[in-house]
């Protein structure tokens, strides 16, 4: 039995899915950089100050997955590069959206 690459990145929560994120603030443009260990690497142009990078990460991930802004939030790691994002919705549907987005 093979292990799916997303198994280390995702964990199911109540009414949603937790996603491990590795943040790269101060990049040239917002971009999905693929898997980075047990996280999805997300680059954003905003600086890591006053929550600007966090807001940009949430907005980028939500819009990339076709979710509303209120359907994604930082669950932990507000001041760290390693974050956990919580996506509200059906975990199976969210997992499929993430697989498509990451082209896995």
Image: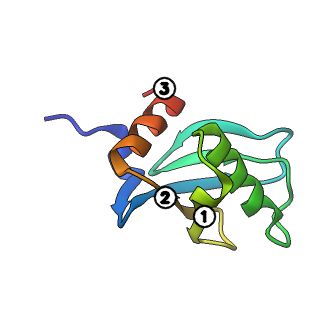
Q: Secondary structure at mark 3?
A: loop
Dot 2 and dot 1 residues touching (CB under 8 Å): yes
Q: Which residue is mark 3?
A: 103
Q: Is residue 74 left or right of residue 9?
A: right
Kindly give the residue lying farthest to the left in the view shown. Answer: 1
Q: Position of residue 16 (x, y in %)?
A: 41, 58
Q: Disc 3 to disc 2, how far (Cα)?
A: 21 Å
Q: Is residue 85 visible?
A: yes
Q: Which residue is mark 2?
A: 88
Residue 85's disc number: none
Q: Position of residue 101 (x, y in %)?
A: 53, 32
Q: Which residue is mark 1?
A: 73
**Crowd tier of the residue under label 1, counting other residues whose Cα lies within 10 Å: few below 14, some 14–19, many 20 or above:** many
Q: Is residue 24 visible?
A: no
Which residue is at a point 38% across and 50% down the rendered structure image?
Answer: 90
Q: Disc 2 to disc 1, how far (Cα)?
A: 9 Å
Q: Vertical placement of 103 versus 67: above or below?
A: above
Q: Closer to the observer: label 2 or label 1?
A: 2
93 or 102, which lies in front?
A: 93
Q: Is residue 101 left or right of residue 31?
A: left
Q: Secondary structure at mark 1?
A: strand
Of labels 2 and 1, earlier in sequence is 1
54 or 96, which lies in front?
A: 96
Q: Vertical placement of 33 versus 20: above or below?
A: above
Q: Secondary structure at mark 2?
A: strand
Q: Position of residue 71 (x, y in %)?
A: 57, 57
80 or 102, which lies in front?
A: 102
């Amino acid at each position: 039995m093979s292990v799916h690459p997303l198994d280390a990145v995702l964990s199911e929560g109540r009414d949603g899915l937790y996603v491990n994120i590795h943040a790269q603030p101060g990049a040239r443009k917002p971009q999905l950089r693929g898997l980075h260990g047990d996280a999805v690497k997300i680059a954003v142009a905003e600086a890591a100050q006053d929550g600007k990078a966090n807001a940009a990460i949430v907005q980028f991930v939500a819009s990339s997955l076709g979710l509303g802004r209120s359907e994604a939030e930082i669950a932990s790691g507000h001041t760290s590069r390693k974050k956990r994002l919580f996506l509200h919705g059906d975990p199976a549907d969210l997992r499929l959206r993430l697989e498509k987005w990451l082209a896995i």
